[in-house]
Amino acid sequence: MSRIDPAGSRKIPLGTDVLTAARQRVADTFDQFERLCLSFSGGKDSTVMLHLVAEEVRKRQRKFSILFIDWEVQYNATLTHVAAMRERYSGCTGQFYRNYMVRLKRQREEWGLI
């Protein structure tokens, strides 16, 4: 039986809780792809994803990469959290990519894109 949420979209019950469904989605992703890179902002949602991906990686004895885009306007607390998560999961991650937006802007200017 479906119901309509306040936004007007239909919700179809899956017969499972959100955490179990998220773990299954992560497992399915690892089944489909040999290499994975998680985009990590340091916010609460991507931190939950980081924990879930790391949990699956440890079960499978694999590694994954992380991409952190530094917008150069984050709070110090966010940058501290990102560094702590990088350290915490260093044993199960491969590359930790950190991209600085100032560098990209400079490259776009050099290439005549802006």
Image (cartoon, rainbow, N blue to C red):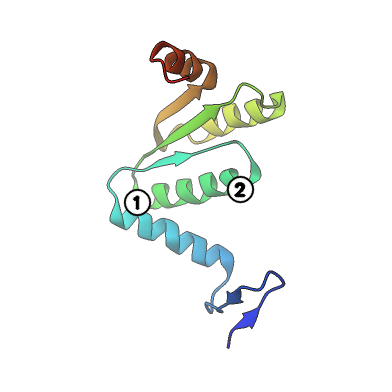
**Closer to the camera in the image, 34 or 103:** 103
- Name the residue located 54 percent from the left edge and 74 percent from the top edge: 16
Q: Earlier in the sequence, mark 1 or mark 2?
A: 2
Q: Which mark is residue 60?
A: 1
73 in relation to 26, above or below: above
Say what secondary structure mark 2 lies in: helix
Give percent across and percent down for residue 54. 46, 45
Give percent across and percent down for residue 89. 49, 36
Between the C-alphas of marks 1 and 2, the distance is 23 Å
Give percent across and percent down for residue 50. 52, 44
- Name the residue located 48 percent from the left edge and 39 percent from the top edge: 39
Q: Quadrant of the N terminus?
A: bottom right
**Res 95 quadrant in image:** top left
The reply to whether callout 1 and callout 2 are in contact (CB within 8 Å) is no
Q: Which mark is residue 16?
A: none
- Name the residue located 54 percent from the left edge and 16 percent from the top edge: 102
Of the residues shown, which amino acid type is indicated by label 2?
Asp
Of the residues shown, which amino acid type is indicated by label 1?
Arg
47 in relation to 12, above or below: above
**Closer to the camera in the image, 41 or 103:** 103
Q: Which mark is residue 45?
A: 2
**Closer to the camera in the image, 38 or 5:** 5
